[in-house]
Amino acid sequence: MNFDVVVIGAGAAGMMCAAQAGQHGRRVLLIDHAAKIGERIRISGGGRCNFTNRDISADNFLSQNPHFARSALAQFSQFDFIKLVERYHIAYHEKTLGQLFCDDSAQQIIAMLRAECDRGNVQWAQPCKVLGVAKSADGFDVTTEESVFACRSLVVASGGLAIPQLGATPFGYRLAEQFGIPVIAPQPALVPLALAPETLAPLQGLAGASLDVISHCSGQQPSFRESMLITHRGLSGPAILQISSYWQNQSYKSGKKQPVSINLLPDLDVGVWLNSHRHSKATLASLLSEHLPKRFAQEWCALQHWEKPLVEHSNRDIAAMQTALEAWELMPAGTLGYAKAEVTLGGVDTRALSSRTMEVRAVPGLYFIGEVVDVTGWLGGYNFQWAWSSGWVAGQSV
């Protein structure tokens, strides 16, 4: 059972890599422990797969090695993947912020990748659990429930820990550690944030409110202009999922939690707006109701004890209102965990890998690609593009 390449993990990155390697004349085996391939693809984008984004650069990714993603993204860009989608006549559309979705179904992307693997005569072992990996004189021996497979090149595309109900495991991290490769501590990313009971209790009246905001994490860039949802457990919505990765990263680096800052009126110069109503007999809540949901405006102002007409508030109150509206600070207690996370932050330390090929520098023939690597994209197709790009470059090299 000898192969040129064994790829462990038949997700987005693994199928892309296997297809490319096969089409370059390699004898490839693709192994996955799941009964169905591409489940993360199938459920993404509400079943329509947000397969990439028109506007992608290395700045849209978070890593302890910030520029690592640049090479792979340049070698196989979002436009290259779009060409592949178009070659298979998959109709798609663009939503907000450059996000691209299938018109019909995410199954079309899975079928496309399967067809690409068929073009490369990729062989499959699935479902098939890997029991162990050992270095051999000629490469690697991969022991599975079915057999022992020998290969010259081994590609690990086993994913992270997000969405454990679909079979996520720490396999890739353990294999990296077996070969002495550092792993940045994994954490849930693109995930709702939980609030402590004492913080959450006063906000119960705001639960269910959805707002267009700018989210920001103290001392971190960037900020995100999207919707935020206040829930019975904390904060959610795209603006929060986006900033959660940076909040997690900051907590990891500093060793302590920092507040998340929310601009509730992103379309207004809040200072100018407040001063224009400085002598108004209206309450702040009634004025805010022109820009925010009425119930939210009322409950939020009551929470701040700003219920008098604006004209009766002191200059100190007005200044405090501006600060709170531009940068309402909430301290998360943590996240809702991997079950609610879109992806995993952290992973195989990219400083151990070649950015051009994804090969481990100290272990020739061993590659790590996709989510198992410490590269985490924004919400909106960026993580799929990292899977396509990292899988593609490894597929050229193995």
Image (cartoon, rainbow, N blue to C red):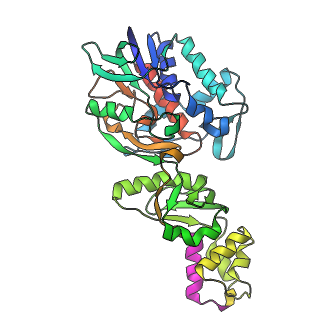
In-front residue for pair 344/204: 204
In-front residue for pair 215/9: 9
In-front residue for pair 36/61: 36
Q: At x 40% / y 20%, what residue is drawn?
A: 397
Answer with left or right where residue 145 lies relative to residue 163: left
Name the residue at the front extreme.
145
Picture coordinates of residue 299, whole percent (x, y): 66, 74
Residue 193 in view, yes or no: yes
Answer with left or right where residue 103 lies relative to residue 153: right
Q: At x 60% / y 77%, what residue is drawn?
A: 303
- Locate the N terminus and report the quarter of the image it occupies: top left
Q: In the rendered image of this protein, does residue 283 appear above or below residue 356?
A: below
Residue 324 drawn in magenta: yes
Res 346 → quadrant? top left
Res 185 → quadrant? top left
Q: Which residues are magenta?
A: 312-326
Residue 300 drawn in magenta: no
Residue 78 in view, yes or no: no
